[in-house]
């Protein structure tokens, strides 16, 4: 196919124009103002010359056979190297250096150098990638830096380090990124160029002095992976609020050291790190070549000025003075803190650092342990820190505890942020590092154990051999065991909080006994199953009157609902055939129950809702074609306000809408006692109230009653349409066939009572109830308050239950010396001695199989004042009184009353894998109870302390029979 004359003329013109440009190129090249040049592919140029028959044209020969017939590629397609670029931000992204050429290319073989005029000439006709390079020198000495210095690089800033610290980097390495630069460039100019990219970043980066360059070298083949591993090793233990910094052993590259890029001497096994500065956070890299900035210990803001308490940047001064404590956490400052008139006195909350409610709850319990807190507030712990204990923290934990307690009692802030305390706890027990939810009981145990190890007065622990009883009396063996314990463990924690168990193992074959005595810090109490299962429900014996009932329930009798009506009728003294059941939900439609359904299954499904039984009138009960219709009362006041009573009407399916209107009015007539001889249609309907269908319309379907989309409830007409017909419409459009009406009140039926007051009255009577009601107190509760629930257990039940023998499982056998074999012995744990501070953990979390646990929601009733432990202790004296006891005169054979008073509770709400922890504690100054919910602190009554959410119970020994442990006089009965 021949080329048209028009195309041939254009191609000839291109060839001649190019010849003119090339003839004058050398002259233009040497011009001083021309310092930007372009790289042109020789391969592409040769293809173009064949396309336009360039050589033939200059030699006045006939065009080549490919004249005008070739498909031209993009210019420089064969030269460009598609590498991962490190900096993709302006102005680097548009800089000539950001276009990479393949390595080992040669001038005049792979490429030629052209100027802007020639490049623009070609790009007038063809497309391609510009590869721009700058020149050095002038005149005939001018050269173009074609092959730039290409080097491996990566970017670092605090959020990158945070991702590594929080283990959120999937590949566990840095990407293989590249930069290139002219070797002759001044290093200071390169710094300035990099700084110009910062304003285009997303994030809060510093405006000035925001870039540093470092060199990392490694013998490893994958240098990016090597750097990542070095950083990860240092920052893996950091937490979210920690300073995201690490120690770096590489070289600092700065223009005060090197003049040009070439002077730096970057090699192929080097990785260049470009570090960017956050506005308020410190640099990521710590290195001896640069000075480390200080920071405020409370909020981590960098410090430059020397303000009295936090040394903040001037522009952040106001923020610091608002939110930072006016003291540091150094030893001398903490020692000097004393109680002031404006001290918070233990009523400060603790900030939630992210799933740390368990820590805040347990810590508030520790804070309100008066003897321990007084020990810390008096600075005694400084004199007892054990710096040689290998399993302690060399005082780091105990100092953080002391600092936190001083802030909670002597500080002025109503909320304290326990960042350093959390870090110290994580140092002692790594399971508390990070921000996962944990257990408040475990937190209390580990913190107290950590305090003990940091304050252990025993500097060198001797080896102690445990001896069996071998026929000796309990007192002798127990005292010997305690002395052995003190040989290795002595601290304020042991003095106040350690008790002693008596552990008994009995062989099931020969009945041999092995008795040992072991120290404990916390008493674990099992929760016995409820003695009687119950079923709770709301019973409507009339339209306006309901009572909440809890009656015994035998789940082994799996009766149908119809059969259960017989049982319930006897219990309620009601006719079984007149009972009607449904499950009410506060937010959705009721569930009407079939009589063939199992009552066990009904009880289970109603656990989080409200099971209701209604007594029908004889007339309602005799209806064969029963049509239950759910109703709710609302009243018009700017909007439709909430119900005062919800329930179910029973109609005959053959009834008309007019009959339904009149029967509903019959139910409501007791409200109209101020009126005589009212005609419903004339005097009541749409004057005092209206009847509305609760619309079932949605985005896809119209209302079943009025056929209007987006219906906002529609009128129930006063006519003769049968209810069955209306029911059919609902079933057609709604598979559930839910039929619900609204009684919308407009005017009070009482002359002197407002409509809102009527609703308030009935709303208070008809609360949606799931909680079990109160019942009589137990004999165990001598003093204080009780919220004993039906079907609940008492703390006495838990104590008795926990002392019962349990057989060891097959994985935890005991070696019987008589039988000479491992046996599944029976083990029992009894409290031999109780300490001054007695802490119980209710074992609410139990294994339901090998993989999962379940939470026991059983209500455990416990006394606030007057917990009588006399019958649950073998020896009535504390372990600290051993030195005054003898085998003939001790707390076993001369037993005295032992009374404790509650001072703190750790509560757990919700289920496993989440939930929420709070604490209740009695303040030593006000003698009042307070709820501690993270940063929120509020006064509560004693009655509010006892709930089914109680998890850890903290008691203090009463030393004066006339006063409780907080020094309040006890009323004698």
Image (tube, rainbow, N blue to C red):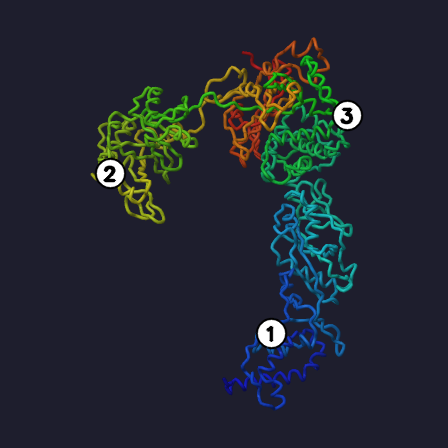
Q: Which residue is mark 2?
A: 724
Q: Which residue is mark 1?
A: 75
Q: Counting other residues with Cα less than 10 Å from the Cα at mark 3, is it few (<14), some (14-19), or many (20 or more)? A: few
First reached walking from the N terminus: tag 1 or tag 3? 1
Residues at circles 2 and 3 in contact by the CB criterion of under 8 Å: no
Judge left or right: residue 886 versus residue 636.
Answer: right
**Residue 257 rendering spot, x and y as whole percentages:** 79, 59
**Residue 598 rendering spot, x and y as whole percentages:** 37, 29
Query: Residue at point 67% right, 67% down?
Result: 97
Query: Residue at point 22% right, 36% down?
Result: 656
Q: Is residue 924 visible?
A: no
| Label 1 residue SS | loop
Q: What's the CA distance linking mark 1 and mark 2?
A: 82 Å
Height in image: 951 above or below 165?
above
Q: What's the CA distance linking mark 1 and mark 3?
A: 83 Å
> In the image shown, does 357 or 316 lie closer to the viewer?
357
Q: Which residue is mark 3?
A: 462
> In the image shown, does 884 or 542 lie closer to the viewer?
884
Say which quarter of the image contains residue 184: bottom right
Q: Is residue 18 visible?
A: yes
Foreground label between 1 and 3: 3
Height in image: 885 above or below 629?
above
**Residue 41 rendering spot, x and y as whole percentages:** 64, 75
| Label 2 residue SS | helix
**Residue 483 rendering spot, x and y as whole percentages:** 73, 19
């Amino acid at each position: 196919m021949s080329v048209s004359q028009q195309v041939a003329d254009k191609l000839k013109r291109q060839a001649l124009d190019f010849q003119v440009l090339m003839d004058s190129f050398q002259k233009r090249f040497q011009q001083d103002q021309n310092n930007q040049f372009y790289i042109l592919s020789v391969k592409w140029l040769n293809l173009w010359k064949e396309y336009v028959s360039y050589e033939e044209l200059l030699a006045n020969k006939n065009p080549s056979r490919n004249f005008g017939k070739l498909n031209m590629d993009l210019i420089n397609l064969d030269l460009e190297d598609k590498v991962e670029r490190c900096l993709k931000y302006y102005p680097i992204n548009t800089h000539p250096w950001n276009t990479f050429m393949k390595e080992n290319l040669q001038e005049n073989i792979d490429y030629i150098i052209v100027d802007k005029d020639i490049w623009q000439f070609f790009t007038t006709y063809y497309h391609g990638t510009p590869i721009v390079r700058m020149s050095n020198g002038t005149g005939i000495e001018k050269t173009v830096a074609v092959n730039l210095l290409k080097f491996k690089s990566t970017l670092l800033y605090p959020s990158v380090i945070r991702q590594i610290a929080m283990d959120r980097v999937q590949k566990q390495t840095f990407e293989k990124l590249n930069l290139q630069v002219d070797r002759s460039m001044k290093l200071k100019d390169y710094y300035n160029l990099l700084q110009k990219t910062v304003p285009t970043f997303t994030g809060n980066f510093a405006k000035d002095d925001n870039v540093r360059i470092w060199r990392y070298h490694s013998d490893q083949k994958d240098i990016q992976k090597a750097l990542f591993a070095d950083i990860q090793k240092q920052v893996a233990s950091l937490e979210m609020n920690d300073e995201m910094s690490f120690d770096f052993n590489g070289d600092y590259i700065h223009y005060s050291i090197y003049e040009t890029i070439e002077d730096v001497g970057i090699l192929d096994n080097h990785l260049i790190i470009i570090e960017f500065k956050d506005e308020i956070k410190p640099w990521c890299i710590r290195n001896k070549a640069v000075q480390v900035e200080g920071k405020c210990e409370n909020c981590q803001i960098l410090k430059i000025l020397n303000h009295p308490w936090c040394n903040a940047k001037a522009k952040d001064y106001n923020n610091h003075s608002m939110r930072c404590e006016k003291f540091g956490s150094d030893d001398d400052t903490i020692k000097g803190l004393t109680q002031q008139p404006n001290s918070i006195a233990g009523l400060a909350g603790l900030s939630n650092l992210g799933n740390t409610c368990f820590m805040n709850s347990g810590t508030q319990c520790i804070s309100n342990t008066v003897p321990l807190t007084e020990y810390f507030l008096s600075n005694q712990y400084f004199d007892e820190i054990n710096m040689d204990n290998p399993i302690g923290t060399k005082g780091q934990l105990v100092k953080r505890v002391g600092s936190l307690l001083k802030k909670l009692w002597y500080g002025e802030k109503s909320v304290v942020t326990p960042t350093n305390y959390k870090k110290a706890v994580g140092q002692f027990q790594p399971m508390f590092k990070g921000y996962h939810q944990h257990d408040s009981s475990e937190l209390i145990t580990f913190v107290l154990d950590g305090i003990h190890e940091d304050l252990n007065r025993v500097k060198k622990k001797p080896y102690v051999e445990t001896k069996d009883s071998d026929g000796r009396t309990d007192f002798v063996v127990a005292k010997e065991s305690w002395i052995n314990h003190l040989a290795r463990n002595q601290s304020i924690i042991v003095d106040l909080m350690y008790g002693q168990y008596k552990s008994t193992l009995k062989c099931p074959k020969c009945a041999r006994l092995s008795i040992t005595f072991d120290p404990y810090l916390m008493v674990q109490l099992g929760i016995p199953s409820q003695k009687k299962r119950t079923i709770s429900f709301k019973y409507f014996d009339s339209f306006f009157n309901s009572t909440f009932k809890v009656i015994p329930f035998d789940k082994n009798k799996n009766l149908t609902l119809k059969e259960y009506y017989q049982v319930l009728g006897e219990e309620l003294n009601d006719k079984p055939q007149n009972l009607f059941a449904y499950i009410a939900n506060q937010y959705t439609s009721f569930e009407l129950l079939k009589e063939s359904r199992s009552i066990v299954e009904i009880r289970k499904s109603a656990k989080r809702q409200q099971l209701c039984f209604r007594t029908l009138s004889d007339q309602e009960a005799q209806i064969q074609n029963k049509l239950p219709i759910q109703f709710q009362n609302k009243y018009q006041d700017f909007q439709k306000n909430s119900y005062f009573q919800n329930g179910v009407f029973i109609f005959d399916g053959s009834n008309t809408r007019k009959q339904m209107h009149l029967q509903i009015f019959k139910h409501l007539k007791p409200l109209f006692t101020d009126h005589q001889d009212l005609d419903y249609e004339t005097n009541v309907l749409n004057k005092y109230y209206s009847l509305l269908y609760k619309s079932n319309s949605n985005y896809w379907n119209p209302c079943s009653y009025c056929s209007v989309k987006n219906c906002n409830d529609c009128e129930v007409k006063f006519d003769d349409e049968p209810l069955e017909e209306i029911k059919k419409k609902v079933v057609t459009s709604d598979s559930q066939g839910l039929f619900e009406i609204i009684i919308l009140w407009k005017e009070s039926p009482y002359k002197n009572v407002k409509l809102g007051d009527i609703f308030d009255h009935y709303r208070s009577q008809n609360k949606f109830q799931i909680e079990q009601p109160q019942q009589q107190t137990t004999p165990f509760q001598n003093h204080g308050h009780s919220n004993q629930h039906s079907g609940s257990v008492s703390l006495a039940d838990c104590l008795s239950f926990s002392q019962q023998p349990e057989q060891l499982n097959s994985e935890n056998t005991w070696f019987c010396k008589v039988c000479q074999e491992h046996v599944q012995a029976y083990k029992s744990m009894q409290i031999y001695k109780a300490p001054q501070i007695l802490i119980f953990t209710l074992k609410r979390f139990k294994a339901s199989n090998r993989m999962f646990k379940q939470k026991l929601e059983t209500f455990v009733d416990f006394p606030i004042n007057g917990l009588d432990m006399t019958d649950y202790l073998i020896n009535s004296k504390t372990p600290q009184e051993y030195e005054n006891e003898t085998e003939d005169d001790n707390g076993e054979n001369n037993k005295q009353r032992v009374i404790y008073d509650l001072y703190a509770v750790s509560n757990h709400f919700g289920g496993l894998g989440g939930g929420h922890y709070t604490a209740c504690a009695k303040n030593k100054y006000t003698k009042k109870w307070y709820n501690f919910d993270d940063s929120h602190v509020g006064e509560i009554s004693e009655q509010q302390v006892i709930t089914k959410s109680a998890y850890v119970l903290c008691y203090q020994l009463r030393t004066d029979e006339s006063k409780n442990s907080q020094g309040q006089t006890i009323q004698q009965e």
